Structure formats: C-alpha cells, structure tokens
Image: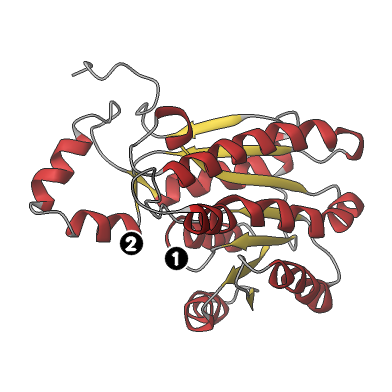
Amino acid sequence: MDLQLKNKVVIVTGGAKGIGEGIVRLLANEGAIPVVIGRKEVDNLKVVDDLKAKGFEAFQVVAELTEPGDCKNAIDAVLAKYGRIEGLINNAGVNDGIGLEKGNYEDFMLSLKRNVVHYYLMAQHALPELKKSKGHIVNIGSKVAETGQGNTSAYAAANGGRNALTREWAVELLPYGIRVNAVIVAECWTPLYEAYIAGMPDPEAKLKDIVKNIPLEHRMTTADEIANMVVFLLSDVSSHTTGQLIHVDGGYTHLDRVIE
C-alpha cells in the first residue's frame, strides 16, 4: 500500500532509539524524510548515518526537550534545512518513577517537562508549517494513564495529559484539516524495557510473568508494530481518522486477564 509519504518531512522526537527509531526507519522506507530530534548527537547520527548509507534522506537535530528554547530551535533547524514540515510525531519521554513516596515538587515538575510539556511546545512551534502543509500529528502514549502502575504519579499524569491533548488538538485543528491521533503503548520490547527487565532479581521469570498476561500470542509488542500504526495514522490513507487513542498492545489494556 502506498502511504503517500514520499518526500514529506516528518519530525520524530526521541527518534534515535526504541519505538522512535522504529518509526524513523519505517518513515524512511516509505519515502518520507524523517528528522530525528534527540539530546545526544552520537545516538541521533547512528540512525541517520545508517539510513543515509542505505540511500535514504534523513536529518537530525540535537535538542534537550525539557528546555523550551530547544524546542523552538529544533523546529527552526528543520525549517532552515527543508523549509517545510508535513508531520510531527511526539514520542520522547521516560517512565522515571516519580511517585507520591519517591520524589518532590521539583521532581514531579521535571517529569512533566520530560513527558508532556514538550509535546505542547513542539506542536505549537510546528503548527504554522502544519497549517500550510495540512500535515498531521501523532502522539505516543502509555496504558499507565488508564491502568495505573504504582509509584509513577508524574508519568501517569503526563500520559493522561497526552491523551487529553490529542483530543483537544483534534478539535482545535479541525478547521485546518490537521488530524491528531495517539498510539497507546503497553508492554513493548525496547532497549529501555530490556534494561528494566535485566534489573530484576530474576529477569527470565519476570518476563514470563508479564507476557503470560498479554492476550494475543502471549508476547511483547515490537517497536515495528507500534511504528506501523503510527505511520499509518500520519499518512493520508487514514484520511478520516482523528481524535483517536489507538492501543497497539495485543489486547493487554482492555481484554480480560483470565483469557488463556
């Protein structure tokens, strides 16, 4: 299927690793021009240089997205390079474990900056160009906003905010033909998740305990499976879909856990 993304400039925050990298690579394969936004140039370039070596066009911008000025500078850098923006994928964030018993006001506010404030800033700064191109926005969210997890108040609050912003922006941007959707992630195998499992007393047992509760095929979601949905929603093939929170999670969030 032709997703009609050829030569479209698409920003992916946190695009150097995990889910973000999967999205960037799929965009390139679809003929788009992915722009990796991340805090470490070495990580950004590892992905971008590999894509260029394979004959794809890609670009990277170093930005610390907790800094408002860096968000604006990232958009400006993309415009200086290409003069246009046709898509924004807000993906960067981290489950940093700031709960009621661990952390304080400063920790909580920093977590919101890491996980939801830059979603707003990147969308705001990209909006004039998205209006011109009738580009679209896809936000990456987490099931934690719906299920809770324990000891991660800030991340849960941020993801609740991501969900709310998705629907708010879908309404606000209707006059411009800009669609806004979210892909909600549950148990997805990424380098961060792998590190989390490795830190358990019995990693193998912990992983088995998790996957047995994932209804479809009793396995983790892959980054590629998340990327497939994200890129579809960004493309005009999903031309009448907006304001949706789509769970790509093997049924983990909503199906009954007693299913064998």
Decide which of tag 2 and tag 1 comes sooner along the chain: 1
Q: Position of residue 200 (x, y in %)?
A: 15, 54
Mark 2 — residue? 191
Q: Amino acid at mark 1?
A: Lys
**Residue 233: where, in percent of width, then height?**
64, 40
Instruction: Give the quadrant of the C terminus.
Output: top left
Mark-to-mark CA distance, 2 and 1: 8 Å
Q: Quadrant of the N terminus?
A: top right
Instruction: Please state if 249 lies on the left or on the right of 220 as rendered.
Output: right
72 vs 149, left or right, is: right
The one of 14 and 50 positioned closer to us in this rendering: 14
Give me the residue at 77% from left, 68% from top. 72
Nearer to me, 235 or 112: 112
Residue at 72% over, 49% down: 4
Q: Quadrant of residue 161?
A: top right
Determine which residue is flagged by label 1.
Answer: 17
- Residue 230, image x and y in percent? 57, 45
Name above or below for residue 141 compared with residue 37.
above
Neighbourhood count class around disc 2 (C-alpha, 10 Å): few under 14, some 14–19, many 20 upward: few
The answer to which of 40 and 68 lies nearer the viewer is 68
Q: Are marks 2 and 1 in contact (CB under 8 Å)?
A: yes
Looking at numbered disc 2 in the image, what kind of residue is underneath it? Pro
The quarter holding residue 163 reads top right
Spot occupied by residue 65 in the image (x, y as percentages of width and height): 62, 66
Residue at (45, 56) in percent of width and height: 94
